[in-house]
Image: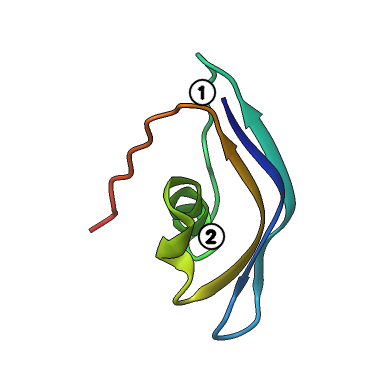
């Protein structure tokens, strides 16, 4: 299970809110898609789920991330 509670991500450079009060629960076997325009925080959200410290240089993130024995992987865009 992956659970995210009340997550807000704000870009440090322009103080733009990318995500606000976002909550999600994914149970075993669930699938999810993240869809949106370029620059709206999709990759940042996935990086934060994988390892929150990956976004600390350019974003402020608040919220709770709960993982129960999951093995996560992340494939960067480059």
Q: Residue furthest left?
A: 78
Lateral position of residue 28 relative to residue 9, left or right:
left
Residue ID at (58%, 20%)? 27
Q: Quadrant of the C terminus?
A: bottom left
Q: Which residue is mark 1?
A: 31
Residue 7 lies, in percent from the top left, at 69, 53
In the rendered view, tell whether residue 44 sits above or below residue 29.
Answer: below
Across and down, in percent, residue 21 comes to 77, 53
- Residue lying at 48% horizontally and 76% vertically, measured from the top left: 58
Q: Residues within 10 Å of mark 1 (few under 14, many from 20)?
A: few
Relative to residue 72, is residue 59 depicted above or below?
A: below
Q: Under tag 1, what secondary structure?
A: loop
Label at residue 41: 2
Describe residue 47's horizontal placement relative to residue 27 as left or right: left
Out of 77 and 69, give the one closest to the viewer: 69
Task: In this rendered view, identify the residue nearer to me: 55 or 42.
Answer: 55
Disc 1 to disc 2, how far (Cα)? Answer: 19 Å
Q: Residues within 10 Å of mark 2 (few under 14, many from 20)?
A: some
Instruction: Examine the image and state in which quarter residue 67 appears.
Output: top right
Q: Report the quarter where the N terminus lies.
A: top right
Instruction: Determine the residue located farthest toward the bottom in the rendered image.
Output: 13
Q: Earlier in the sequence, mark 1 or mark 2?
A: 1
Compared to residue 66, the image places residue 15 above or below, namely below
Q: Secondary structure at mark 2?
A: loop
Task: Please provide percent x and percent y for residue 39.
Answer: 50, 66
């Amino acid at each position: 299970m992956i659970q995210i509670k009340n997550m807000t991500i704000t870009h440090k450079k322009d103080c733009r809110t990318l995500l606000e009060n976002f909550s999600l629960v994914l149970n075993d076997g669930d699938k999810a898609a993240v869809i949106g325009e370029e620059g709206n925080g999709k990759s940042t959200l996935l990086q934060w789920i994988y390892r929150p410290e990956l976004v600390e240089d350019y974003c402020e993130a608040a919220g709770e991330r709960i993982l129960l024995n999951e093995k996560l992987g992340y494939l960067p865009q480059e």
